[in-house]
Amino acid sequence: MAIVVQGNAGEDDRLLLWVLVWSELIAFGILLVSFLVVSSVNAQAFELARLHLSPGLAAANTMVLLSSGYLAAVALRRRQDVVRVRRPLAIAAVLGLVFVAIKCIEYTGEIRFAADATLSTFFELYFIITGFHLLHVIFGSLLLALVAWRPMPGNVVLIATLWHAIDLVWLVMFPILYLA
């Protein structure tokens, strides 16, 4: 993703942003459809594997990301005021890192089940999908912090849009992985 150095994002930057967002949504869509197909083939093993997940921690992470997304939206509304945009972006970045910490705690309880032959397919897909998302959260949090440090209206638009795409992916992943 190109971070704009000028004050406003140009049309080329917005096109690049939307290409990035849609390519990410398509990539996660393919992963989630694959998960659903494999889960229909191995329904009993997937039901058993889900018993070893922590939906409470995942729900807490959902609230963390939604709060972070709200703050990104606040920053977006304030993008013309450099002083007032910093705090919501910085807090959004910190909340992104809180998401990472909660996910790592969750992983410590789940990793031991990945070696079980009955559950391994579920957990391989689970760790691939959630790990890929986790990398996006880490990267997005770093970009949020960078833009909070040096905010420009165009960059605020870019990072807020990217952050909302990361939120959207989690909102689709959560029920498929934890509740389906």
Image: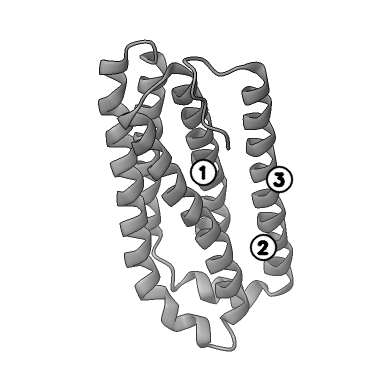
Instruction: Provide the residue designation for mark 2.
Output: 35
Q: Position of residue 151 (x, y in %)?
A: 37, 24
Question: Mark 1 falls on what kind of element?
Answer: helix
Q: Give the residue drawn at x 48%, y 36%.
A: 163
Q: CA distance from mark 1 to mark 2?
A: 16 Å
Above or below for 119 versus 71: below
Q: Looking at the rendered structure, which numbered label has been put on residue 7?
A: none
Q: Are marks 3 and 2 in contact (CB under 8 Å)?
A: no
Q: Is residue 56 visible?
A: no
Q: Give the residue drawn at x 57%, y 46%.
A: 172
| Disc 2: CA contacts within 10 A as few (<14), some (14-19) or many (>=20) | many
Mark in front: 3 vs 1: 3
Q: Give the residue drawn at x 47%, y 55%.
A: 134
Above or below for 31 versus 4: below
Instruction: Provide the residue designation for mark 3.
Output: 26
- In the picture, measured across the screen, residue 121 lies left or right of residue 105, that is right
Q: Position of residue 3 (x, y in %)?
A: 51, 31
What kind of residue is marked 3? Ile
> Which quarter of the picture shows residue 34?
bottom right
Question: Mark 2 falls on what kind of element?
Answer: helix
Instruction: Provide the residue designation for mark 1.
Output: 171
What kind of residue is marked 2? Phe
- In the picture, measured across the screen, residue 109 lies left or right of residue 5, that is left
Q: Quadrant of the C terminus?
A: bottom right
What kind of residue is marked 1? Leu
Q: Residue 76 or 47: which is nearer the viewer? A: 76
| Disc 1: CA contacts within 10 A as few (<14), some (14-19) or many (>=20) | some
